[in-house]
Image (cartoon, rainbow, N blue to C red):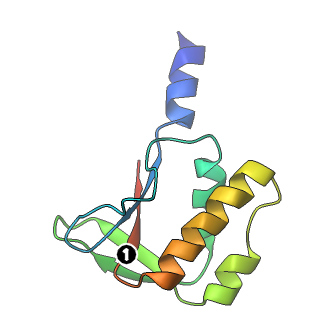
Amino acid sequence: MLRMQQQETKMSLNIVVETIEGFEHPAWDAVRHGPDRVIAAILTSLPSIEIRDYEGDQLLRPANFTLWKNAAPDDSEARSRYLELMKILETEPNYWLHLSY
């Protein structure tokens, strides 16, 4: 039972890419992924621009794209997902990150 609870706790994060109005990016898969905890730890450690969405949830965007891109994790799966995320945020300024725990 404890092991199952630990697994649920480990997987209880979604990285959502959305507009301030709550519309999710069509190309981003917000369903839980293994490297999302690693990615979230990096994202929350970097300088960011923070606002609230229409429901009051915190949204963030890179304050410095070069710094954020250079912080990509070494693990290939995490790195690929992370850089995909950076590309969306850099090319589509209406989208923000929402870390849903």
Q: Residue at x 61, y 86 (%)?
A: 65
Q: In which quarter of the image is residue 47?
A: bottom right
Q: Which residue is drawn at 73% across and 68% down?
A: 72
Mark 1 highlights which residue?
A: 95
Q: How many labels does the image show?
A: 1
Left or right of 40? Residue 49 is left
Q: Choose between 12 and 29: the one closer to the eye.
A: 29
Amino acid at the residue labelled 1: Tyr
Q: Residue at x 43, y 50 (%)?
A: 30
User: Which residue is outermost to the top?
Assistant: 1
Identify whether 38 is placed above or below 96: above
Query: Percent x, y for residue 83?
Result: 66, 68
Residue 44, can we see it?
Answer: no
Identify whether 88 is placed above or below 12: below
User: Which residue is outermost to the right?
Assistant: 74
Secondary element at tag 1:
loop
Around disc 1, counting alpha carbons within 10 Å, would you say few (fewer than 14), some (14 to 19), or many (20 or more)?
Answer: many
Q: Choose between 6 and 83: the one closer to the eye.
A: 83
Q: In which quarter of the image is residue 10?
A: top right
Identify whether 94 is placed above or below 10: below
Q: Residue at x 25, y 64 (%)?
A: 23
Residue 40, can we see it?
Answer: yes
Query: Percent x, y for residue 15?
Result: 46, 55
Left or right of 99? Residue 10 is right
Query: Percent x, y for residue 60?
Result: 43, 75
